[in-house]
Image (cartoon, coloured by chain):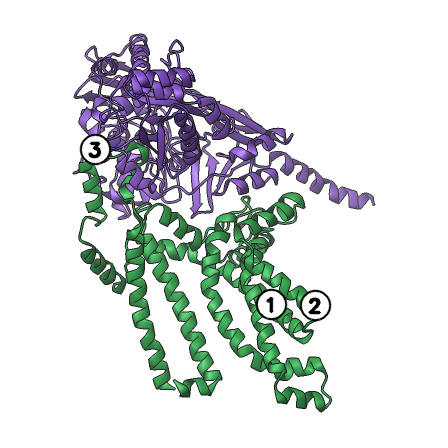
Chain colours: A green, B purple
Amino acid sequence: MFSFLLKRIGVVIPTFLGVTLLTFSLIRLIPGDPVELMAGERGVDPIRHAELLAKMGLDKPLLVQYWHYLTGIFHGDLGTSIVTREPVIREFFTLFPATLELSFCAIIIAIVIGLPAGIIAAVRRGKLTDYTVMGLSLTGYSMPIFWWGLLLILFFSVGLGWTPVSGRISAMFWVDEVTGFMVIDSFLSNEAGAFISALRHLILPSIVLATIPLAVIARMTRSAMLEVLREDYVLVARAKGLSMPLVVCIHALRNALIPVITVIGLQVGVLMAGAILTETIFSWPGVGKWMLDSIYRRDYPSVQGGILLISCLVIFVNLTVDILYGVANPRIRHNR
Amino acid sequence: MQKLLTRLLPILLLLLFVGQVQAKTLVYCSEGSPEGFAPQLYTSGTTFDATSRTVFEGLTHFVRGTTELEPGMAESWTVSDDGKVYTFKLRKGVKFQSAKHFKPTRDMNADDVIFTFERQWKKDHPFYAISGGNYEYFNGMSMPALLNKIEKVDDYTVRFVLNRPEAPMLANLGMDFAVIQSAEYADAMMKAGTPEKVDQWPIGTGPFTFQGYKKDAQIRYTAFKDYWKGKAAIDKLVFSITPDASVRYAKLKAGECQVMPYPNPADIAAMQADPKINVMQQEGLNVGYLAYNTKVAPFDNVKVRKALNKAMNKQAIIDTVFQGAGKIAKNPIPPTIWSYNEATVDDSFDPVAAKKMLAEAGYPNGFEMKVWAMPVQRPYNPNARRMAEVIQADFAKVGVKVEIVSYEWGEYLKRSKDVNRDGAVLLGWTGDNGDPDNFLAVLLGCDGVGGSNRANWCYKPFEDLIQQAKVVADPAVRTKLYEQAQIIFKEQAPWATIAHSVVFIPMTNNVKNYKVDPLGGHIFYGVDLK
């Protein structure tokens, strides 16, 4: 087990270095320099241009810049935003709870609906229910998030008035930040109605963000369950007179869940990518929208820092899933 | 029953009373997050809306809804005969707002004015380097070259001595970078070891007191009760940050906000038809143009430039690109600016005459050229690619074959400055201070060649006029000079002036007294809710 752990962690280090190199070089490959963008039509004279580039450290050779970036990371310093002049790490962690809160709700929705939907589709294979679930999940998977979000807003918020249009809480409330999670902070605040408002604001963005993972989980659960249902022990259980729901829930589900858990782990990356669009549509102040703005503004330190921290999160979740998978299935840890 | 009524009555009365005195809160769905809270350090209108137009004020003001100047923190001023010395008498009894971490002990005075400017100007000032020390507007308006010294004559008199006469100086002082910060606040924060707090938690003399900012979500203000002009009609002002225009519209319809900026042009007709929404509109202080590179053939020939201007169907551009939300531009300055010359005659759309002029210029079979299309949407050009396509079709009719080129925005700005640039560039400008100098000298002056003057046009008769207008203090004389300059511009045609956009501000019907700011700001002092 120890050597398995060591191997897994050993893979993480080159991945991490690869991410730093990739983020550093990719943002610099996009043409256009941040000083020109900042100045806009107004322009800036060449002397001032050089001065500003030097101030941002962008006048140095790329290798030196990369070295500064790497040494900064090991000192816990991800640099300062070119636009807001705030430390990147502080900006990230100010916004991260909003993304985490939204992603958490989305993954819960995806699991709570996706798992049973997949099971039902597998059990009723080839029937109308199966076709409906699979058809809907395919639609969900191929739905453009931007369009889907606006559609829900127009229908539920503007048309029916059931949910708020955007934001994390009504503009009428000002909730002091304790944990950064609006649902918890609004619950702790003394403002009447703030908690309900926070919950209502979570509904539409969570549904939108959950759509793709939900579809993936439902399809994965269905195929894993179909595999398991063909196993001999299921037939034996059925032959012994156990009812189908009992066989599915007690015997089949446990084995079918192993690949599904891996897929759920992989959805963390999908959630982060989906958060960029969802947060933009719903004016959700999270890291997704912040990263998008930073890319537009060529805010190199923010893009580098943001992608690095999100990558670390994805790497960590996948490492955890890998290790748990190894714990759950001894064949894997012995084979590797 | 009677007992119950006796108990309920006071509660009912209280509820009625509370209902009546409930705070008036105006929610503004702003288009983005401010870069920070010190307007001196940034250049975006979003930041100015959240700071200089709410919390702060400058020595001079623009009358709300106009580009006319009025006294602000300066009650009055005098200008020396040589135009180099400006002496400002400051308004007495002007209070600064307070916060939990700072309570002002004195009124605004000359020390605050000097602090505000020296902070941006003098590199050895203790606050120069705080928060990054980039004063792009201050530098962009050439203030370091312009200022000789700023003196405190007494507590309520400040003297600005300039190196050369500069007629737009008063308008410059009404700009966002020139709003007055509190020197006392800066000192207190420096002593507390948190000087950057001055730029994070704004304290000024304006109509609204900053209450807090939740990053990318909300900015909150309350009306400043000691504001020298009187407390604002609304009690609370909330900026609800909503970057997507469709979502802003949805929020307006759902009643989640009362005012929104920058609607999608495609939504305007529906907004105007909605009885619950009032759409205010005004021509923006901007101009969209196609700048020929007058240093490179064939555009060094005025006949070619005039011919191309005649080949362009501007009305088609207004209809297809602006979807009606624009007006044909004939002058390089918008009609909302004083000295706009009504008498100039625009090049009429006449492809036959254009073809003839090209033949006279030595191009009977036309030629090939590039038209640069911006990759971004701007107020003066909502869809540059589409505009370039319309121009391409128009020019093809006179034998000129257009290749449309585009680059990433930063790259576009950089490459389009090149004096040897190939082709004509689509670009535009939004005015800063309502002074014609801010358009004519910046965009067409000889100093701007290789920079903001994308036509690389340096024409002595024009240059002499705008330089003269810079140093004359009398507005009537300046008006005459600028009117003449516009006639020369039209004759020489370094640009095809295309359009001035129309700014639309949709708001719910219960918003009263909102005025569209020609300078592009969103100002809530004076606004009320029904």
Query: Would residue B378 appear left or right of B462 to someone viewing this image?
Result: right
Q: CA distance from mark 3 to mark 2?
A: 73 Å
Q: Residue A51: x percent and y percent? A: 19, 41
| Camera-nearest label, 2 or 1 | 2
Sequence-first tag of 2 and 1: 1
User: Which numbered marker is on residue A114?
Assistant: 1
Farthest residue, direction front:
B365
Tell me the crowding category of disc 2: few under 14, some 14 to 19, or many 20 or more residues within 10 angstroms, Cα based: some
Q: Quadrant of residue B124?
A: top left
* Residue B332 appears in the rendering: no
Amino acid type, callout 1: Gly
> Front-most of B215 and A140?
A140
| Camera-nearest label, 3 or 1 | 1
Query: Would residue A135 appear left or right of A258 to someone viewing this image?
Result: right
Q: Is residue B417 above or below residue B66?
A: below
Disc 3 to disc 2: CB gap under 8 Å: no
User: Which numbered marker is on residue B121?
Assistant: 3
Tell me the crowding category of disc 3: few under 14, some 14 to 19, or many 20 or more residues within 10 angstroms, Cα based: some
Task: Name the residue at 56% across, 77% down.
Answer: A257
> Front-most of B196 and B97?
B196
Amino acid type, callout 2: Thr
Amino acid type, callout 3: Trp
Q: Which residue is identified by label 2?
A: A129
Q: Quadrant of the C terminus of chain A?
A: bottom left
Q: Is residue B103 above or below residue B472?
A: below
